[in-house]
Image (cartoon, rainbow, N blue to C red):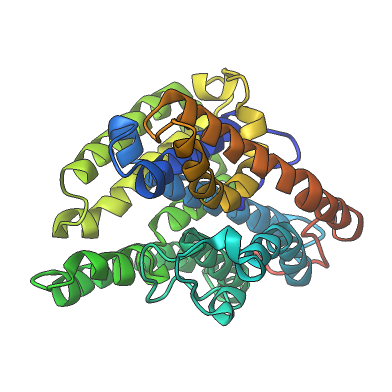
Amino acid sequence: MTAIAPPSRVYGLDTLRALAIALVVLHHYVLFVSGTHTFGWVGDIGWVGVDLFFALSGYLIGNQIFSAMRSRQGFSLRHFYARRLLRTLPNYYFVLGLYFLWPAFRGSAALPPLWEFLTFTQNYNLKPGTAFSHAWSLCVEEQFYLLLPAAALLIASLRHSLRWTWVAVGLVLVGGMLVRAYLWEELVDGSAHWQANYYKYIYYSSFCRLDELVAGVSLALLKNYHGPLWQRLTARGNLALACGSAVSALAFYLFLSDHLGFAMSVFGYPLLAFGFALLIVAALSENSLLRTARIPGAASLALWSYAIYLTHKQVCILAAEPLRKLGYGPESLTAIAAMLALSVLSGWLLYRLVETPFMALRQRFVPSNFGQPALTLQPR
């Protein structure tokens, strides 16, 4: 959710990011406000917006790391971490402060301990429905930001480092499937608390949710270290768009049919990752419809998406009761329009008042990930 576009904006990626935040907002509206199928299957499957954010983050962050490693200036781990922290922490800490310092903002929902949020470990053993529960995905991403560059530099120090990188990608994907299979058999199948256990130990766990992030990293590897293959892929952008849409639609259908079952728990997330990876390829392809089409408002939604993600859920929850007292239930068009507008407005305010100043500081003091000449991945 915290990935940013490259300096030269790619409108296809903006479209995907806008789609991701729209899906998440609709899904949370269904879960925490209306409690019914307000937006049909779109609201029910909207949780996949988080997975689309993961795939985008994997590609964008991976591309930043690998392109810097291949440059003459080299990759600076210190600069990378400084840029990430300036990008993610100000908004996050501001909203976290609202939850802990303003009881009226968080409402009656239980709030996990502060240290879990500060250490980005809140996603482990997380009970669904707690206050600021949607921060779980930020925890997954922060852990990813911490480990990926260090792992890349470590592997780059090995012989045949590029080969070992692909081995690592494969191990993460296969390992994720094996972990999910084991946890499903041990903690979900036959358990009296099977649904809570699914979310607590599988859905929210970083060990089980790296598929889309790794898929995005794989695209960055292809772009930076397998140029001819990458050129062939991006030369067929509309084919990638068609295939990615078909694979994603299949994953949506299967998840809607049996989200919590064994097969989808184990194999559904890699399938979703593959579909989203193809859509990202289409977004990066010069002549694809996804890259060339300009959807009004998509670029702005993409720019504000991180801030909207942080604020929208509680804003909608708080606005629902006053609107109900005015005679506008959560299923009414007036209430839906008002709460969606408030979600965008609150995100825009957070973006303007908190995120923008810190991004200006980042541009001034840490303008890039470049450092001194460093290790890069070697094919042999």
Task: Judge by depth and name the residue closer to the eye, 85 or 71.
Answer: 85
Q: Nearer the viewer, residue 61 or 260?
A: 260
Residue at position x 51%, y 69% in the image? 160
In this picture, is 170 found above or below 356?
below
Q: Which residue is pictured at 70% across the width and 42% down the height?
A: 6
Would you say 170 lies left or right of 362 here?
Answer: left
378 vs 327, left or right, is right
Q: Indicate the position of residue 35 as horizontal and vertical percent values.
A: 31, 44
Name, please, the residue furthest toward the left.
190
Q: How many marks?
A: 0
The front one of 150 and 119 is 119
Q: Looking at the image, which is closer to me, 314 or 3? A: 314
Residue, x 38% and y 57% (percent of image)? 211
Residue 177 drawn at (x, y percent)? 26, 64
Q: Residue at x 91, y 55 (%)?
A: 364
Residue 151 occupies which quadrant of the picture? bottom right
Residue 126 image offset from top left, x and y in percent: 39, 72
Above or below residue 226? Residue 342 is above
Q: Is residue 141 above or below residue 153?
A: above
Residue 210 in view here: yes
Compared to 339, does 114 lie above or below? below
In the rendered image, residue 152, in percent from the top left (x then y), is placed at 58, 68
- Quarter of the image with the C terminus is bottom right
| Residue 219 can be seen, yes or no | no
Q: Quarter of the image holding residue 150?
A: bottom right
The extreme right residue here reads: 364
